[in-house]
Image (spheres, rainbow, N blue to C red):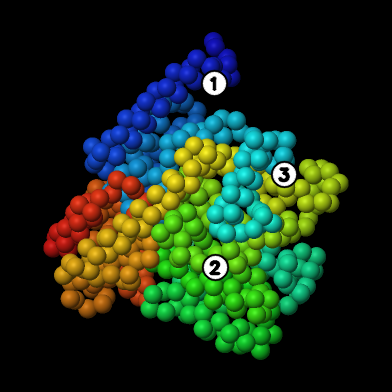
Amino acid sequence: MEDILSKVYDPEAFREAGHRLIDSLADHLGNTQHGLTEQAITWRQPDDALERWQFDPEAPGGDAIDLLQEILAESVQLHHPRYMGHQISPPAPVAALAGFLGDFLNNGMGVYEMGIPGTAMEVNVVRALAKQMGFGPEADGFLTSGGTLANLTALLAARSIRAEANVWQEGNVRPMALMVSEEAHYCVDRTARIMGWGEAGIIKIPVNDRFQMRTELLEEYYQNAAAQGMEVVAVVGSACSTSTGSFDDLEAIAAFCGKHNLWFHVDGAHGGASVFSQKYRHLVKGISLADSVVMDFHKMLLTPAVTTALVFKNGTHSHQTFRQKAQYLFGQATDPEWFNLARRTFECTKVMMGAKVYVLWRTYGTALFDTFVTRMYDLGAAFAVLIRNHPDFELAVEPECNIVCFRFKSGKDAEAENKLNARIRQSIVEDGHFYIVQTQLRGITWLRVTLVNPGTSMNMLAKLLERVVQLSKD
Ligand SMILES: *Cc1c(COP(=O)(O)O)cnc(C)c1O
């Protein structure tokens, strides 16, 4: 009998399997792009899915590539022009290939020598991003696994640098807090709680009718917190908020932080990518005044998940999050070493995520990102016009980017209207022709799209509205 390990590592079997998979992915890409594939999502009830994908570890077999093709067919199709759900890009195929290479190499990245090209690509990508954001040469940072973890890392750095106490040594010896808009992504709330600050540690600033932080209230909330003995460490600006894609006034937050010597963090997970658009970069005016900025490459920059940059205005700050020593990994050095990235990240072993961005950016240049971001934001504005001019629909707010919240107006009472829109959304997902999501704003249920596909046309968006009207009748 052939040895199982030599079978697994057989180069010729791999060559054959790899060619088959790439061929089917290329066919799939063409079919989804040209609308030959019906489904943007194949819906299944959770229990049904569990049953469908069950397996017996003691009875292996079957063809691995056939199996991968089944997974492909039943997954959400981000390359489909009728995909307009959550905030994540249809990855550029070349970036996905870089991801595949990274998986194949499995360079651990924890120490410099375990990922030499990966480390150097990552640092060059982050520095190029910092420059694009308008930061000076002293800015620096790294990539990490997702916006959620990056926000936590940034705010741990903020605490380490701005808090009066040495928290790493002494723990939280006095109550601390951060300030953020009530529309911020939930991970900021989670961060405050993870840091041990509890509910009081997150001070939520109300938003205006465009769902932007009311920065004129910062002083009042700050003084109230101070009067209660709280030490406010940081203010987080959302660029943009998740539900409605609203951009906070970063210049106003920067001025406030300057006045009180607070850390200014920008959560630009989605909208930080606006810096690449000549037409829309004004949305993030003031971003380079931040002490730290988070931006997801996997949201608006055609890169596979998860690939998130955390940029620090003052690069030396990026070394201060974790003061713990791991001598066996890093030796005796006390100087900041740009090349031992794991000193600065949560991850020890880390995916070679830099390669995915690097290959894309180096091959196609900044013009690719400008074109994509600009086109998607333009499409958001055009869809808003369509909705505004349609008698059966209303917009939650004029979109600032490619996130659009709208709903069907039935003329019924608020609760019935919420239920109707939620049912419409569920029917759309179960049907799978389109993929859209929903959100709640001040007790109202809205249908929500994030336009992330270059193939999405105005004609398709008009069809989506037609479909909603049709479903409202059923
Ligand atoms: C998506 C998003 C996050 C979370 O990022 P992940 O990469 O999904 O962890 C955080 N903040 C904002 C504003 C977001 O839009």
Mark 2 within 8 Å of ligand 1, using the beta carbon: no
Q: Quadrant of the N terminus?
A: top right
> Callout 1 environment at 10 Å: few (<14), some (14 to 19), or many (20+)?
few
- Residue 310 in which image quadrant: bottom right
Decide if residue 353 is in sight here: yes
Tell me where residue 90 appears, x and y as whole percent: 39, 45
**Count the marks: how many?**
3
Give the residue pinned by disc 1. 8
- Which image quadrant is residue 436 in? bottom left
Q: Residue at x 57, y 87 (%)?
A: 220
**Which residue: 50% across, 50% down?**
297
Residue 85 — which label?
Answer: none
Using the rendered view, name the quadrant where residue 392 is placed. bottom left
Q: Is mark 3 within 8 Å of ligand 1?
A: no
Q: Helix or strand or loop: what does disc 2 sit on?
A: loop
Q: Please name the residue that numbered disc 2 is placed on.
A: 286
The numbered mark, 3 or 2, whose residue comes first in the sequence reads: 2
The residue under the point 60% across, 66% down is 290
Q: Amino acid at mark 1?
A: Val
Mark 3 lies on residue? 339
Instruction: Tell me where residue 124 appears, x and y as whole percent.
Output: 62, 45
Give the label, 3 or 1, closer to the camera.
3
Query: Alpha carbon of mark 3 to alpha carbon of mark 1: how far?
Result: 34 Å
Instruction: Indicate left or right for 5 with 331 as reference.
Output: left
Instruction: Decide: few, some or many residues near mark 2? Use Cα within 10 Å; few <14, some 14-19, many ≥20.
Output: some
